Amino acid sequence: MTALLEVEDLRVAYGKIQAVKGISFSVEAGQIVTLIGTNGAGKTTTLRTLSGLLKPVGGQIRFNGKSLKKVPAHQIVSMGLAHSPEGRHIFPRMTIEDNLLLGAFLRKDKSGIEQDVQRAYDLFPILGERRKQAAGTLSGGEQQMLAMGRALMSRPKLLMLDEPSMGLSPLMMQKIMATIAELKAQGTTILLVEQNAQAALSLADRGYVMEVGNIVLSGSGQELLHDESVRKAYLGED
Amino acid sequence: MNELPQQLVNGLLLGSMYGLVAIGYTMVYGIVQLINFAHGEIFMVGGFGALTVYLYVLPDGTSMWVALPLMLLGAIIVSVLTAIGAERFAYRPLRGAPRLAPLITAIGLSLALQQAVWAWYPGGEDSLNFPQIEGGPFEIGSVTIQTGDIFLFVVAPISMAILAYFVMRTRTGRGMQATAQDPDTAKLMGINTDRIIVIAFALGAAFAAVGAVAYGLKYGQVQFRMGFILGLKAFTAAVLGGIGNIYGAMIGGLALGIAETLATAYIADIPGMHQFGSQSWADVWAFVLLILVLLFRPQGLLGERVADRA
């Protein structure tokens, strides 16, 4: 069986500086796969390339059997790949409801969209209570919920989450991680980028460790969680 | 002082014309952060588009009530096509270039369009008479609406209502707002931001064209340089309202029209100011207002933004 997402020898550069230096990984349907690593490892660059915001200088990206290399960014979401970006990037001066509707921008099924807006409010009740409020007035954790809810509005085959726990209180982080587990239980395939390696690996079926543009280690979430070098470098143990 | 209501109405009518043109500045700025200084000329060619329909397309003696909708259509077509062409061939190749480059291009394009009309439009080197509506003036209570203003009185509020509905309630309008706030994330939503940029130019041009027909009817003539001062005034209106905010453009236009009209009407009554009351000082007061806004409220009347909290 071929994977939902297959990345092969992907290389991305900003001018002359190579940020991603030939990485290969894959995501099977139904899995949570995580990329972990420190700042500057190339995780966000990888996700931005997958969703078309950056153009690779080499390698292959196959999603659901099709190459993504020549597809413009605005068409990628319609193929089933949704991206909740680092730093959340909600639309601050639009209402929460309009933000969610933008997540369904390419869908035409009105009743289905309404159902999914309701589903987002069920998943994150605070968003439902504030649906007419400008999204910029939400707290960081609430904005993260909105960014995730918005990404789900396209009914993606693969949901990419970039640093969903960044800058959140421990309590809010737990809530977000629990939601990710819940989404998986509902059958959503997730590619998760995190600096919080402990939380990410506990949830993940498979993990990849990135360092300065390369994947240096891979394994199941549990394997990596118990790997000595990972424990030293990313879980703060000596 | 019972002429005050009349002055306010005059100001609102003049201001709604500024507002119609200001929308194009603010919309394009909101989406691509470009001050399109050729927008005054996009407005101007609309006036000539309307005149062309009247002089060269419709049979002589066509009633203005029949001609006017067709002239409006002609104005919109000419302005929109000019704006789309400008976006495609002048601005798009410079996207991602330093901001000075498209700004200089805009000024160049502005001069080129003026000179093209001057050189190639039959009689374009002089002012050309614009056909007028018959009848009027119209009395509403103690207030008189001049015949040349009745088009503005009817069409400006309708245009602005359509725009507000389009931006706030339609899918494309939401796409425009999203693109203005965060273009990369808009792409992640599936929004074709290149297309949104073209729509912003086209929409701004359409409203400028409506403004141009209003101008022709109000002043009875069109001229290749008519977009210069009016463009600056509309730009002032956009800054006054808060550039990037479409309601700001409308409110800024109205505020500027009222301020200019009241200044012209009443400033001579202030002791020692009698020599500043004539119509020729109107432009001065408009730009004094711009300077005051830039000094004391540079974000404009509605330019306050919701904080993007971390």
Image (cartoon, helix red, strand yellow):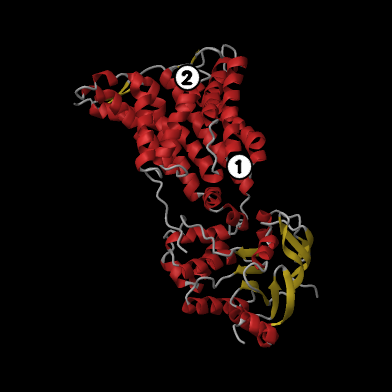
The C terminus of chain A appears in which quarter of the rendering? bottom right
Chain at numbered mark 2: B
Crowd tier of the residue under label 1, counting other residues whose Cα lies within 10 Å: few below 14, some 14–19, many 20 or above: few
Q: Is residue B274 left or right of residue A236?
A: left
Q: Would residue B247 be visible to someone looking at this image? A: yes
- List x then y, in percent, for residue A101: 53, 59
Label 1 sits on what residue type? Pro
* Farthest front residue in view: A238
Residue B285 lies, with reference to residue B186, above or below; the image says above
Q: Is tag 1's residue or tag 2's residue first in the polypeptide sequence?
A: 2
Q: Are marks 1 and 2 in contact (CB under 8 Å)?
A: no
The N terminus of chain A appears in which quarter of the rendering? bottom right
Q: Is residue B278 left or right of residue B18?
A: left
Residue assigned mark 2 = B64
Residue A177 lies, with reference to residue B247, above or below; the image says below
Question: Which residue lies at the image location 60% right of the left edge and 54% below the top edge?
Answer: B184
Residue B102 lies, with reference to residue A204, above or below; the image says above
Mark 2 element type:
helix
Chain at numbered mark 1: B
Q: From mark 1 to mark 2, how far is it between C-alphas?
A: 47 Å
The answer to which image quadrant residue A162 occupies is bottom right
Residue assigned mark 1 = B98
Mark 1 element type:
loop
Q: Nearer the viewer, residue A25 or A211?
A: A211
The answer to which image quadrant residue A191 occupies is bottom right
- List x then y, in percent, for residue A142: 47, 69
Looking at the rendered structure, which numbered label has been put on residue A127?
none
Crowd tier of the residue under label 2, counting other residues whose Cα lies within 10 Å: few below 14, some 14–19, many 20 or above: some
Frontmost of labels 1 and 2 is 1
- List x then y, in percent, for residue B64: 47, 19
